[in-house]
Image (tube, helix red, strand yellow):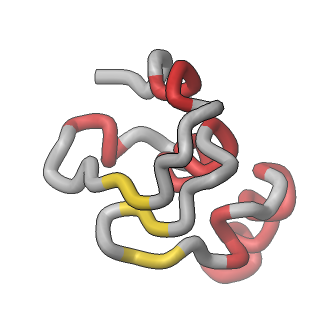
Amino acid sequence: MTLSGISDFRHTPLESLVLKRNPCEFQERYRQLVFSSLPNLKMLDGVPKLPEDCSPPSIRVFFRMCTIL
């Protein structure tokens, strides 16, 4: 399952979305991809938009690497 069609909802007033327990939830950078595709979204899977949901992928990867070390 992919998130390829989610950008079709980009121009909707959608503010909350639940995809929990959906196979796409396990896709890498799932939250970042959803929030970047849906700019009006404020809540995903019952969790409010977090600062890390908006961070550029390269920063997040670096952060994750530092956390592991």
Residue 51 image offset from top left, x and y in percent: 71, 77
- Residue 10 placement: quadrant: top right
- Residue 55 placement: quadrant: bottom right
- Quarter of the image with the C terminus in it: bottom right
Farthest residue to the front: give it.
13
Residue plotted at (64% across, 64% down): 53
Residue 62 image offset from top left, x and y in percent: 80, 64
Residue plotted at (68% across, 44% down): 36
Residue plotted at (32% across, 47% down): 25
Residue 28 image offset from top left, x and y in percent: 49, 44
- Residue 16 placement: quadrant: bottom left
Nearer to us in this view, 14 or 65: 14
Left or right for 35, reference 1: right
- Relative vertical location of residue 66 with respect to residue 10 in this rendering, above or below: below
Nearer to us in this view, 27 or 69: 27
Nearer to us in this view, 39 or 24: 39
